[in-house]
Structures are given as C-alpha cells and as structure tokens.
Amino acid sequence: MIQLDLACVDGVASCSCGWHVPCGNTVTHICRADGVPAVPAPIPVAGPGAHLASLLGRLGLSETPGCKCRSYAAQMDRLGVDGCTDRILEIVGWLKAEAGNRGLPFVDFLAKMLVSRAIANARRSAADAEKASAAQGPDR
C-alpha cells in the first residue's frame, strides 16, 4: 500500500483512485499500489454506555473523581445492546449505587427508563451506521 497526504478541498480529499474521504485540513489517504482504494476501518459507533453517559450529561450528571462511571460505560459498550438489555437491572444497580455515593435521590423506574433509552439510541446508531455503510457500496 502507498500512503498519500492530500490537501482538503471543500471538506473532501480525493485521489485518482476515486475514493473520497471526509477530512479536516489534511487527511492521510491510503490506497493500494494498483490504485484500488484500501477499505477504511469501520466508523466507530457509540455503544449503550456512551449513550447513557451522554443522557446523564444532559441532566447535569458527569463523572466525578473516584467514581466508576467510565468503567461502567466501557463495560456497557462491550456488552452491546443485547447484553445490556439482558443485564438492565444490574446496570440500574450501578446507577443506584453511584447516586447513593453522591447523595442524590434515586427512582428505579426512571433509571430503568434512562438505561432503556440509551440502549435504544445505541441500537439506532448501529442501524444507521450499517445503512450508511451499505449505501456506500463495497468499494467505498
């Protein structure tokens, strides 16, 4: 493979192989020596943990020193939507413990709704990414 650093033109870098990559000011573009574009890595999709962290952030709740929030979010992302659905009561328990550590009021039903919303958002993000990938075709 060869690697080219290309200037950005109107937010898109391109080369003679015809593969276009969204970019900032510059982009590293990797093509095979025969001019066929290398297949880019899949676009990372936010998992349930990232979505839950975002929802909690909108409520003014964020990570504090000593909390396990980041660890729990990463674990949820590894579990994926199906794993989180299967273990939703355990995840609600994490939230309840953290609320207790912070001296915050806690309502199980609302926490379960919040986790369910995060799971649904992650499922939707994955489906949207899959549709976008399929729309680009196999030779993106």
Image (cartoon, grey):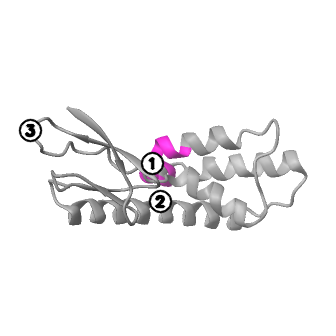
Residue for badge 2: 122
For the residue marked with disc 1, what is the amino acid? Gly
Q: Secondary structure at mark 1?
A: helix
Q: Position of residue 76 (x, y in %)?
A: 54, 45
For the record, the magenta segment spans 76-85
Mark 1 burial class by Cα count in 10 Å: few <14, some 14-19, many 20+: some
Task: For the C terminus, give its image quadrant.
Answer: bottom left
Residue nearest the viewer, comparing 32 with 43: 32
Query: Disc 3, disc 2: CB below 8 Å?
Result: no
Query: What residue is at 70 percent from the left and 60 percent from the top?
Result: 56
Q: CA distance from mark 3 to mark 2?
A: 38 Å
- Mark 1 vs mark 2: which is more N-terminal? 1
Secondary structure of the residue carrying numbered label 2:
helix
Mark 3 neighbour density, 10 Å: few (under 14) some (14–19) many (20 or more): few
Q: Earlier in the sequence, mark 3 or mark 2?
A: 3
Q: Amino acid at mark 3?
A: Asp
Between 35 and 59, which is closer to the camera in this rendering?
35
Give the quadrant of residue 111.
bottom right
Compared with 70, 129 (above or below) is below
Question: Alpha-carbon distance for marks 3 and 1?
Answer: 38 Å
In this rendering, which labeled residue sits more in front, label 3 or label 2? Answer: 3
The amino acid type, in three-letter code, at marker 2 is Ala
Binning the other alpha carbons within 10 Å of mark 2 as few (below 14), some (14 to 19) or many (20 upward) gives many
Label 1–label 2 contact, CB within 8 A: yes
Residue at which label 3 appears: 34
Q: Which residue is mark 1?
A: 80
